[in-house]
Image: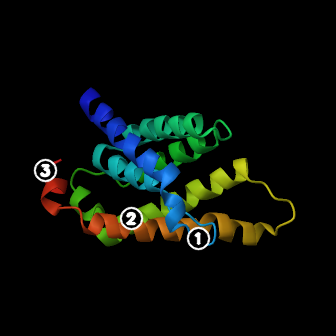
Amino acid sequence: MRTKFLLSILFFIPVLIFQITLVQFITWNAITPNFILILLVFYSILYGQLYGTVLGFVYGLLFDLITGGLLGSAMLSSTLAGFIAGYFSNENKRHINLKPFNFGLIVLLCSITASIIFSIFSTIDFNKNIISSLFEEGLLPGLYTSIVALIIIYFYPRRKLLES
């Protein structure tokens, strides 16, 4: 259990560096994909709900501390995303949930939820309509993240998914 957790933290470090530095180059109209969330959903499906919830807490806390954002906003949204993704963790259906279409839908659900929670706590703009704000800060980043997740999981070898 400890090696799995340490391995997931080691994978988190380069993804965090990529998220902070290079994702700005694939940003479209201030909408960015969340690669940390894709990694979190992947581990939550592989190892279960409790693992995903704790890992989401750790990922969010580290993200908040390193980026200097509002402490707790990414932590709460990542914890909730790990908890939701953990519902799809089942030893008998793991290979089904890690297929590209199913994985993309799970990432879409988790990403929309995490984006809405994050935007509520970090970027409150009283001049915008609440519906347009939820669309721009919740649905669009969720769609972009799920499209990127489809591409990533499509090229991930199936043999490794079944062995884990």
Q: How is the image coloured?
A: rainbow
First of labels 2, 1 by sequence position: 1
Q: Residue at position x 40%, y 48% from top?
A: 15
* Residue 120 pos. (x, y %): 71, 53
Q: Disc 2 marks which amino acid?
A: Ala
* Residue 11 pos. (x, y %): 33, 42
Residue 98 found in image quarter:
bottom left
Q: Disc 3 marks which amino acid?
A: Glu
Q: Nearer the viewer, mark 3 or mark 2?
A: 2
Q: CA distance from mark 3 to mark 2?
A: 21 Å
| Count of numbered labels shown in the rendering | 3
Which residue is the site of mark 2? 149
Which residue is the site of mark 3? 163
First of labels 3, 2 by sequence position: 2
Q: Residue 83 versus residue 38: which sits nearer the camera?
A: 38
Q: Disc 1 marks which amino acid?
A: Leu
Q: Is residue 138 left or right of residue 63?
A: right
Q: Residue 135 versus residue 151: which sits nearer the camera?
A: 151
Position above or below: 76 against 111 = above
The crowd level at tag 2 (other Cα within 10 Å; few <14, some 14-19, many 20+) is many
Task: Single out the residue that lies furthest toward the top.
Answer: 2
Q: Residue at position x 38%, y 64% from top?
A: 149
Q: Residue at position x 78%, y 54% from top?
A: 124
For label 3, the SS is: helix
Which residue is the site of mark 1? 140
Q: Is residue 117 left or right of residue 51?
A: right
The circle drawn on residue 70 is none
* Residue 156 pos. (x, y %): 23, 62
Residue 73 found in image quarter:
top right
First of labels 3, 1 by sequence position: 1
Task: Single out the residue that lies furthest toward the right.
Answer: 127
Position above or below: 128 against 41 = below
